[in-house]
Image (spheres, grey):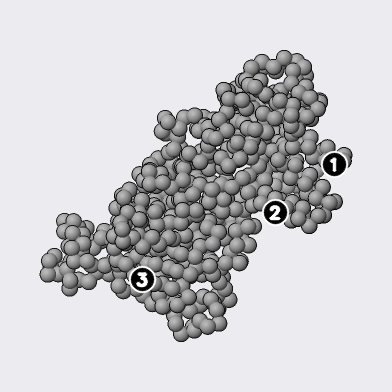
Amino acid sequence: KKPLTMIRKPSSIAHKRFDEQSRKTRILENLKINARVNLKSWCIFFGLISFLLGLVARIMTWPLLVDFSIEQNRVQSQCGSIKNVSFSLDEKRTFVTNIGNMEARIRNCCTQSNARSTVYRPIHYYETLVHTGMIAHPNPRRVAIIGHETGLKLREVLKHSTVEDVKLFYDNDSIPAEWSDCSDVEIDEAFSPSSKSCFEDPRARVTQRFSNPREWFQDNSGYKEEATSEEFDVVIMDIDIQDLDAEFIRDVHDSLDEDGGILVAHVGRAPTGRELVDHASHFKEILEETGFESIHVFDDEKSIFSPLSYVVAFVDYYARTYWYQSAAEIELRLHQLIHEMRSNKPALLYFDGPTMVSYQTPHKVYERVYCTDPSHDEECNEYTGFDPSIVNIPLTDIQVRNSSLGEQAGRGLFALKTLPSDSPIGMEGHAQNFFVMPTTWDVIESTVEWVGENGITLAMSEIGGLEAFIDGYGFASRLLGEKSWSIDSGILEFMNHGCNGTANYGYHSSLTEWNADTNTLPEELDTTDSPYNIVFDRHMKQVFDSGDYTLREIAEGDEIFSNYLDYSGEVEFWEEEVMTLRGQCAGEAYGTISQYEMMKKQ
């Protein structure tokens, strides 16, 4: 017989294993319970923290958003005791306290008795409204501010060292001193910090205060014999655009500098994806009607409640060049133009180069609103994306050889196989094209001129080669105001001009070098005839580098030609371009690249 302990041992081991498993199970259950309790506790904790932070933010920002005051004694005689008060954060949103049946009566009484309401917006609103227009002008010296003036817009204007004269058109008498405090702006050593008010700044020469801008601009516009004919570089408008009409905007337009005048205005809420309504559409129509040649819309999403929309309008189309500056160029200009602060604090808290560049490309919602108009179907379908059903001809199907046009034409492109009709070539390379901004081209031309004047032969050949490369292989455009260039980064740059209507690539056009009127730029080539085109603003590079197709089937071995006149858009050089192409097609003149290569050999 086995000992009793030997018999009980297995039973004891099994019991211990059972106890161990039960203990682990209990531990896991407790951990799960504790985890659920802790998760609920953390959720409640973070919820309370979020609520408290939101409450604190609400309390802190509320005084910065609205300061509403009504002189009750003036109104009481007409309206009685005011019980309901409505006040606006902007022209589209109105908050009402103690809602009752007296809202309309109070609004009417406040209007009749000239009771005042003062809207104070965050500082980024004033920086956006003022500096976008100021930095888009090469030398803003004369500025007008129209609308409710708190001193904040004036203070932002006076930060620009170029400003010499500011005229204010406003109707509020009482302005808090801290809103118009310019003591921190370090203009020059003669400026005394004790002269705190921006309105008393002698260097800005805030010359006059007008309560009725409509009458003043009507007299100044040139329609009356007694007009003063005073011109402004920048006009800043901060009033309800619903109250504006074409007559007043025309008077403002005629009071702006005809070569580079700019109007900038806040136009209310920006459209949203849920509400495809552009509240500023009527205002932009008035701007076009009254003669503004370039109109741009942008929004600022830093607003607490919803993005705000702004419009910048240029009297002259070619003045829009400064609107398309790079971030580095804008940063340099801000460094050169903006006065430093005596406290060494940043002069601008929100506005800088990258911010300005972000305004150059409007939000997609504007494009969706724009493309709901059937009259815009052509550009909306052409430039808002690439059609995947279109067959793209790869660059491997073409080859570079000496042109069939002769020695004066240089190199050309030839089909290695039959190319189908209505197909782009090398579409995948369009995004890599070279792009020369107007300011960059100005530097190149100035350098070439300086080198030539100083007789530096070696340098002339190098910088001249860069100029010849851009001029010979690139396509000039005025979409950015002054001349800019787009140059194919691949072999498409070797495509020659098809003389006498023989072009087989590009887009269908009956224009040739022989039937073109040298005195008149064709309307279809004039990019300045569309003051407001949101599709072009959003897809500028695609407009430059796409839209060309094979006009018919191109047989194997045939040379591929485009019509160079279709890429011309300069009124002042139109005659020269037409005559140059006539000479080349007649074999009497050489192209830019051929001329440069001959010069190098000599």
Q: Nearer the viewer, mark 1 or mark 3?
A: 1
Q: Nearer the viewer, mark 2 or mark 3?
A: 2
Q: Is residue 360 visible?
A: no
**283 w.r.t. 118: above or below:** above
Mark 1 → mark 2, Cα distance in angstroms: 21 Å
Q: Quadrant of residue 419?
A: top right
- Three-letter amino acid code of the residue under disc 2: Ser
Residue wearing tag 3: 208
Q: Quadrant of residue 334?
A: bottom right
Q: Secondary structure at mark 2?
A: helix
**423 w.r.t. 477: above or below:** above
Between 220 and 188, which is closer to the camera in this rendering? 220
The reply to whether discs 1 and 2 touch (Cβ–Cβ < 8 Å) is no
Can you give x and y, in whole percent of width and height, for residue 549 in the image? 63, 24
Mark 2 → mark 3, Cα distance in angstroms: 42 Å
**From the viewer's perspective, is 325 left or right of 457?**
left
Which residue is drawn at the image coordinates 53% and 76% (left, top)? 187
Farthest right residue in view: 601
Can you give x and y, in whole percent of width and height, for residue 78 in the image? 12, 66
Which residue is drawn at the image coordinates 18% and 63% (left, top)? 112
Q: Secondary structure at mark 3?
A: strand
Circle number at residue 44: none
Can you give x and y, in whole percent of width and height, for residue 405 in the image? 76, 23
- Three-letter amino acid code of the residue under disc 3: Gln
N-terminal-most mark, 2 or 3: 3
Residue wearing tag 2: 446
Which residue is drawn at the image coordinates 74% and 18% (left, top)? 558
Circle number at residue 600: 1
**From the viewer's perspective, is 73 left or right of 277?**
left
Q: Is residue 429 visible?
A: yes
- Three-letter amino acid code of the residue under disc 1: Lys
Q: Residues within 10 Å of mark 2 (few under 14, many from 20)?
A: few
